[in-house]
Image: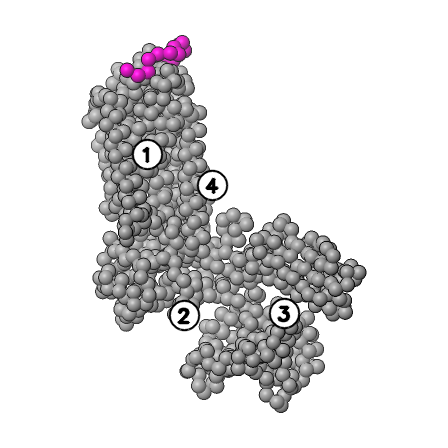
């Protein structure tokens, strides 16, 4: 039997104060970045919102000979587009992403719906002809570039998407809160949900500090890390619940440490695998998945961390306030041997913290 | 065999696996020998899985029908028609008023003699359909207002009508396998159009949004042989009417057609003049039966549109042309006079819209004329276009990264859990197969976020196996016999697995209900993956352990 992580015995709960301090420090850095950027002269916005949430157009252009970002920017300026963001495609050297806000129509581009794309095209036309229609860039000798993708989201739709995303996420968390309260206890539910909030905020802090773009796929990743974080918390809560019925009279503090240590090998195997799979996505998943991969990358670390550093201490702390270690009795299947020694139901008051 | 339960379990697993294999790789036609070749299987797989636009390329458009404008136009038309109806009957209706804002749509008619109000109401209702409007009489003002409920009904009808018209336009244009449906909340008036394989949606968009208000109108001018009366500016035209435009007159711009010999010079602003026409039109676009692009000379730049009228319109038109020989008539398109000609003789149902159209623009125009006018303008709210090459690249990168991750996971599981690792690998592969089969069964499209959901489902599947194996190891470590260690490992881990799965399924279900397109794709695959995982990680994996136990009655150790 190959076991790397055996008989771990760490006083996790004793580390709660430095760990919580670490979380708060990261959150403050994120907050500083978000607020600071908005008030700095010529600073960017708190977050680098993609067109999904902010409205605008992203044009993906493929070149035969890719001009430098500055050349593209000045080409766009020559047709009156000043707020363009030029972004390299990390996995394809001949492609470039050009992000422009929703532009009003002008004489050159009379169709309001097409204005942004039309302006970008006009700017790029200064480099040479586009391979138009169904012609591939390599099949058209005269052409120097081709627009291979556009994404336009109007102001109404972007607001709708943003609100919908926030509402859906919050409702999802309420659902999680209710379910854990139903299966465990309100104290655990609060611990898990606060941990999830913590994870989302930490991830957003990274996105603000590094100005990674937040698009709809990042939102999908945030939702995913919510799922993972809760999953992790539940695995440990479930073990605490089991240990509580097996070792009555033991302090909750000690039981929580014991539960975390007992599940540590699962935590490391599962989260290690997830982490490595996400790393593969970050490295090889391509530009379209970049934001998604980065969010999951941060999330897979903080999701594991927050179970130990946030969710469990909160549950214990609250229960110590109540002076009672409450949790719903688990229905252990009666399979003969003495795992199901939960017949005694007498103890109600017992020390919960050291 | 002593254990019939085990045989039943095995039979269930084999049956479900075979169905899954058929759904994912099987042909939807009667099988031929080529369906069993590598290429055949690959083709069937590609046919069975419905890839989203972000993976196969295409255009995704969300548009909104401006239903408020529709109600506004309706109110204006009714107000005009009501006043005309009353005045035609020589009743003392002096003016009309229109309210069309903030959700209020009111037609008002002012009557100079309140005693005649009732006859005005009767006369108006005979000519104008105001049956759904709330009528009220206050002094010498009669008002009809549109109740909120009726507004909703009318808005919905407008969206339905727009949907039908857009459908006929894109079908005629030849877009393959388009998806056209209402989008978002019922009251939002949004329509979603997805066109696979279209990477330049400009022409389609122009075609969809094109207005096509055809009107044949009488021009106010002395009859032929004197030339048609035109005015150099709009103001000059207005002056000829005494400074104000009466309700039965309109001033329209008129761009004179270039001579065909000069066909290469294109200057749309050249020589715009104005003409005064009688309102309402003799015949409008709703009377149109057929419209075609026709070339006069065969050159691409000299197309015009020939049209014919429906019987009722033709009768009206024939009647009018019979009485107005020598008078000038305007063919107006979208409130712009395309041609002005005098009536040589009685015409019934044929006409032309001249103007130097190109072949494509003439064809598009004929198409929009035929499909009828949109009830209101539409605006685009969201447009996403993925070129087929970008789609193919992103699917390749995503798939390669995921497959790489999978292979790593499989190697690790086999290395770390030895014999039991085989269970995990079988469960993982089965999970993937069945999730794909389920996606195909519910005809869901696989998008990029969908692939993300799939990967996560697989992640949770790995976790389930790890939970079970770690638990069995713990029980073995506590000195239990192999059989009871397996039993308790599964039973105890099952509680954890159920809790984690239900939490994630719950939050994904909420995402599905309240999220939009891409989020939904993610939620669907994740929920399917998790439901299937309860089968593959728990039921299947346990059955394999049961087989292992069955073979050796007395087991001392377990490869885990």
Report helix, strand or loop for mark 2.
Answer: loop
Viewer-closest of B454 and B159? B159
The mark lying in front, picked from 3 and 1, is: 1
Q: Main secondary structure of the magenta part?
A: loop
Q: Residue at x 29, y 36 (%)?
A: A27
Q: Given the image, what chain letter belongs to the residue carrying mark 1?
A: A
Which quarter of the picture shows residue A16? top left
State the extent of the magenta-drawn residues as a range.
A339-354
Report helix, strand or loop for mark 3.
Answer: helix
In the rendered view, would you say A29 is above or below A177?
below
Q: Which mark is residue A198?
A: 1
Point out residue B20 in the picture as x, y percentages from the top left corner. 40, 40
Report helix, strand or loop for mark 4.
Answer: helix
Q: Which residue is mark 4?
A: B513
Q: Is residue B213 visible?
A: yes
The mark lying in front, picked from 1 and 4, is: 1
**In the figure, is residue B315 to the left or right of A151?**
right
Q: Which residue is mark 3?
A: B287
The mark lying in front, picked from 3 and 2, is: 2
Q: How far is the residue under mark 2 from the one under mark 4?
A: 43 Å
Q: Residue at x 31, y 47 (%)?
A: A38
Quarter of the figure with the N terminus of chain B = top left
Q: Which residue is mark 2?
A: A107
Q: Given the image, what chain letter belongs to the residue carrying mark 4?
A: B
Mark 4, other Cα within 10 Å: few <14 / some 14–19 / many ≥20: few
Mark 2, other Cα within 10 Å: few <14 / some 14–19 / many ≥20: few
Q: Given the image, what chain letter belongs to the residue carrying mark 2?
A: A
Q: How far is the residue under mark 3 from the one under mark 2?
A: 35 Å
């Amino acid at each position: 039997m190959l076991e790397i992580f055996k008989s771990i015995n760490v006083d996790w709960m004793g580390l709660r104060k430095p760990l919580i301090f670490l979380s708060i420090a990261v959150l403050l850095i994120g907050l500083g970045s978000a607020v600071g950027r908005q008030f700095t002269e010529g600073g960017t916005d708190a977050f680098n919102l993609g067109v999904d949430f902010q409205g605008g157009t992203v044009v993906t252009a493929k070149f035969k000979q890719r001009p430098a970002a500055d050349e593209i920017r000045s080409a766009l300026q020559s047709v009156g587009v000043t707020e363009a963001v030029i972004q390299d495609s990390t996995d394809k050297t001949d492609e470039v992403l050009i992000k422009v806000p929703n532009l009003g129509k002008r004489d050159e581009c009379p169709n309001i719906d097409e204005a942004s794309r039309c302006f970008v095209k006009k700017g790029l036309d200064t480099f040479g002809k586009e391979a138009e229609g169904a012609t591939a860039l390599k099949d058209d000798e005269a052409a120097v570039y081709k627009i291979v993708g556009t994404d336009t989201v109007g102001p109404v739709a972007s607001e709708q998407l943003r609100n919908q995303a926030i509402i859906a996420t919050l409702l999802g968390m309420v659902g999680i809160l209710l379910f854990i309260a139903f299966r465990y206890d309100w104290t655990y539910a609060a611990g898990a949900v606060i941990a999830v909030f913590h994870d989302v905020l930490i991830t957003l802090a990274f996105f603000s500090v590094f100005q990674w773009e937040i698009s709809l796929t990042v939102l999908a990743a945030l939702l995913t890390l919510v799922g993972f974080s809760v999953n992790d918390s539940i695995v440990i809560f479930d073990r605490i619940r089991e240990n509580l019925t097996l070792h009555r009279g033991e302090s909750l503090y000690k039981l929580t440490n014991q539960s975390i240590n007992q599940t540590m090998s699962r935590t490391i195997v599962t989260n290690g695998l997830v982490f490595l799979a996400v790393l593969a996505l970050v490295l090889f998943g391509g530009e379209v998945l970049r934001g998604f991969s980065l969010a999951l990358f941060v999330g897979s670390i903080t999701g594991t961390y927050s179970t130990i550093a946030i969710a469990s201490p909160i549950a214990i702390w609250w229960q110590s306030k109540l002076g009672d270690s409450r949790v719903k009795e688990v229905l252990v299947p009666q399979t003969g041997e003495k795992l199901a020694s939960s017949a005694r139901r007498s103890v109600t008051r017992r020390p919960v913290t050291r | 065999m002593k254990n019939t339960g085990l045989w039943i379990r095995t039979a269930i697993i084999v049956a479900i696996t075979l169905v899954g294999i058929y759904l994912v790789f099987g042909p939807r036609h009667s099988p031929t020998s080529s369906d069993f070749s590598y290429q055949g299987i690959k083709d069937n797989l590609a046919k069975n899985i419905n890839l989203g636009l972000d993976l196969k390329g295409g255009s995704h458009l969300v548009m909104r029908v401006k239903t408020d404008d529709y109600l506004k136009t309706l109110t204006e038309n009714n107000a005009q028609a009501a006043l005309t109806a009353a005045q035609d009957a020589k009743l003392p209706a002096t003016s009309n008023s229109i309210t069309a804002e903030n959700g209020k749509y009111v037609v008002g008619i002012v009557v100079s003699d309140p005693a005649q109000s009732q006859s005005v109401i009767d006369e108006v209702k005979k000519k104008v359909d105001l049956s759904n409007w709330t009528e009220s009489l206050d002094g010498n003002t009669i008002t009809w207002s549109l109740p909120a409920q009726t507004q909703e009904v009318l808005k919905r009808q407008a969206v339905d009508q727009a949907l039908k018209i857009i459908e006929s336009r894109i079908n005629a244009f030849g877009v393959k396998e388009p998806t056209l449906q209402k989008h978002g909340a019922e009251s939002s008036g949004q329509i979603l159009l997805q066109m696979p394989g279209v990477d330049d949606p400009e022409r389609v968009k122009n075609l969809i949004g094109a207005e096509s208000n055809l009107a044949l109108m009488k021009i106010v001018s002395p009859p032929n042989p004197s030339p048609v009366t035109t005015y150099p500016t709009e103001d000059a035209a207005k002056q000829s009417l005494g400074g104000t435009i009466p309700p039965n007159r309109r001033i329209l711009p008129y761009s004179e057609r270039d001579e065909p010999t000069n066909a290469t010079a294109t200057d749309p602003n050249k020589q715009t003049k104005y003409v005064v026409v009688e309102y309402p039109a003799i015949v409008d676009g709703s009377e149109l039966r057929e419209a075609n692009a026709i070339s006069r000379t065969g050159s691409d730049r000299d197309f015009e549109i020939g049209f014919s009228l429906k019987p009722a319109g033709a009768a009206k038109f024939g009647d009018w042309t019979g009485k107005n020989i020598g008078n000038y008539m305007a063919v107006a398109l979208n409130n712009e006079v395309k041609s002005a000609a005098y009536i040589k003789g009685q015409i019934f149902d044929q006409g032309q819209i001249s103007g130097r159209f190109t072949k494509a623009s003439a064809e598009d125009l004929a198409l929009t004329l035929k499909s009828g006018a949109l009830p209101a303008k539409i605006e685009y709210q969201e447009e996403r276009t993925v070129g087929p090459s970008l789609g193919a690249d992103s699917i390749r990168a995503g798939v390669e990264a995921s497959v790489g991750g999978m292979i790593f996971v499989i190697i690790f599981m086999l290395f770390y859990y030895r014999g039991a690792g085989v269970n995990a690998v079988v469960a993982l592969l089965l999970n993937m197969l069945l999730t794909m089969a389920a996606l195909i069964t519910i005809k869901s499209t696989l998008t990029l976020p969908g692939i993300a959901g799939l990967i996560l489902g697989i992640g949770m599947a790995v976790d389930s196996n790890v939970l079970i194996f770690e638990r069995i190891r713990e029980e073995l470590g506590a000195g239990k016999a192999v059989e009871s260690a397996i039993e308790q490992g599964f039973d105890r881990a099952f509680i954890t697995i159920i809790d984690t799965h239900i939490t994630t399924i719950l939050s994904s279900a909420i995402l599905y209900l309240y999220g939009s397109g891409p989020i939904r794709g993610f939620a669907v695959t994740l929920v399917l993956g998790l439901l299937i995982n309860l089968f593959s990680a728990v039921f299947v994996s346990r059955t394999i352990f049961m087989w292992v136990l069955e073979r050796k009655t007395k087991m001392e150790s377990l490869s885990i």
